[in-house]
Image: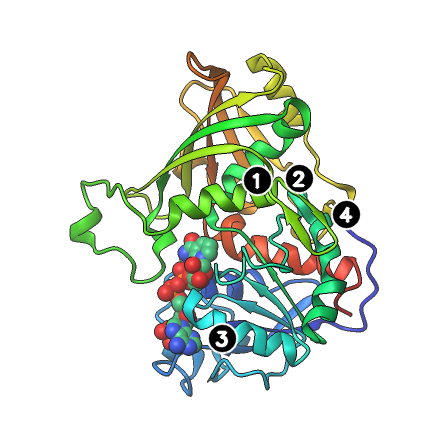
Amino acid sequence: MADIQLKGKIPVAVLGATGAVGQRFVKLLENHPWFEVTTVTGSERTSGGVYSEACRWVLDEDPPEAVGHLTVQDSEPNLEARIVFSALPAGIAKDVEPQFAKAGYAVCSNASAYRQAAGVPLVIPEVNGDHFDMLEQQRAAQGWDGLIVTSPNCTTTGLAMTLKPLDLAFGVRQVFVTSMQGVSGAGYPGVSFLDIHDNIIPYIGGEEEKLQAETCLLLGRIEGTERFPAEIGISAQTNRVPVIDGHTLSIAVKFDRAPTAEEAILVLEGYEGPAAARGLPSSPEKVIIVRREVDRPQPRRDRNANHGMSVTVGRIRKCPLLDLRMVSVVHNTLRGAASGSIMNAELLVAKGYVK
Ligand SMILES: NC(=O)c1ccc[n+]([C@@H]2O[C@H](COP(=O)([O-])OP(=O)(O)OC[C@H]3O[C@@H](n4cnc5c(N)ncnc54)[C@H](OP(=O)(O)O)[C@@H]3O)[C@@H](O)[C@H]2O)c1
């Protein structure tokens, strides 16, 4: 683990703690070595209530007792915390997150409100942790004592983590991607049973645009606070399917230098990411797990690999139109949301942006 000397745990708040992603944060932070949840917030509907009663808990394991006793607060920047994890709807996050950054909090956001905004890093530590280098200039330009960093859309996380090692080794040029996304990706209560049972919904509002734009930002580079998206052509089709957790991506890729399937497998299996992303409390043992069985990965069997932090890739084979085809599975509320954001916060601490 990264050799970080902290004077006690850092107090953190979870904004939108009563929702699907907020609950993941609360559970994941239960025994975190660096962070301790001191505050939870919700909407007018839950604010003022005791968390364990106000929150309709949807995870299999019980909520942590210490957080269960907390009173749900409003999402206002007067909370006892140095880091705030935002699991707010984008429309609310747009107003609230800058208020927290201005008031000196480090905001680690899951919402889409600022992912594509100038000067705000969109980061997966193993893909582009160096984009945190924008933060000094972000603070100076905005006059903030705090900061905002964002995590990508859950589906984007699976695609960007799969493509990064391949892009470094072979140069990714074009991608066709079709997603099969679990229902927890729509939050709670999400899609109605009558709509999703025995069915597939071939539309998720705004998802295809996010998947295309965010992936290019993650694989792109920065100069100062300016981001230069990777010049990759991406055509995305996104679908909601009757799976609870886990997003599955069927991907075809064209490269600058086409690898064989075996060369791609070796690159994916060997990928460790930048040194700064290794050894953090949430760093997985392996960034990418490659399955060689003909029928893997599958969301039910592979979404929890390495506590839901690894992306599992399989069915890597030649594509008759582009160069290679493959299938990836990512856990949408863990690596694709709460755990990814916690790892971003760990990297912020490791890089000295939060003390
Ligand atoms: N689900 C995923 O897989 C996933 C993945 C990546 C990113 N995200 C993003 O993460 C965010 C949360 O998603 P989710 O799936 O957890 O949604 P959700 O289940 O609908 O939860 C929304 C949370 O925000 C709170 N909230 C709603 N309106 C509010 C207001 N006006 N003021 C303050 N709090 C308010 C809710 O509180 P109440 O309970 O009091 O209503 C609840 O705690 C979204 O921006 C989403 O796009 C989700």
Q: Earlier in the sequence, mark 2 or mark 4?
A: 4
**Residue at point 49%, 81% (across, down):** 69
Q: Nearer the viewer, residue 178 or 212?
A: 212
Q: Earlier in the sequence, mark 4 or mark 1?
A: 4
Pointer 2 residue:
285
- Which label sits on residue 276? 4
Q: Earlier in the sequence, mark 3 or mark 1?
A: 3
- Which label sits on residue 80? none
Q: Earlier in the sequence, mark 2 or mark 1?
A: 2
Report the Cα–Cα distance between label 3 and label 2: 37 Å
Report the Cα–Cα distance between label 2 and label 4: 14 Å
Mark nearest the camera among 4 and 1 is 4
Tag 4 secondary structure? helix
Q: Disc 2 residue type?
A: Glu
Pointer 3 residue:
95
Q: Disc 3 residue type?
A: Asp
Q: Picture quarter containing residue 216?
A: top right
Q: Nearer the viewer, residue 301 or 216?
A: 216
Q: Is mark 1 within 8 Å of ligand 1?
A: no
CB under 8 Å between callouts 2 and 1?
A: yes
**Residue at point 65%, 49% (across, down):** 227
**Mark 4: few/some/many CA within 10 Å (<14, 14-19, 20+):** some
Pointer 1 residue:
310
Q: Disc 4 residue type?
A: Ala
Q: Is residue 209 left or right of residue 276?
A: left
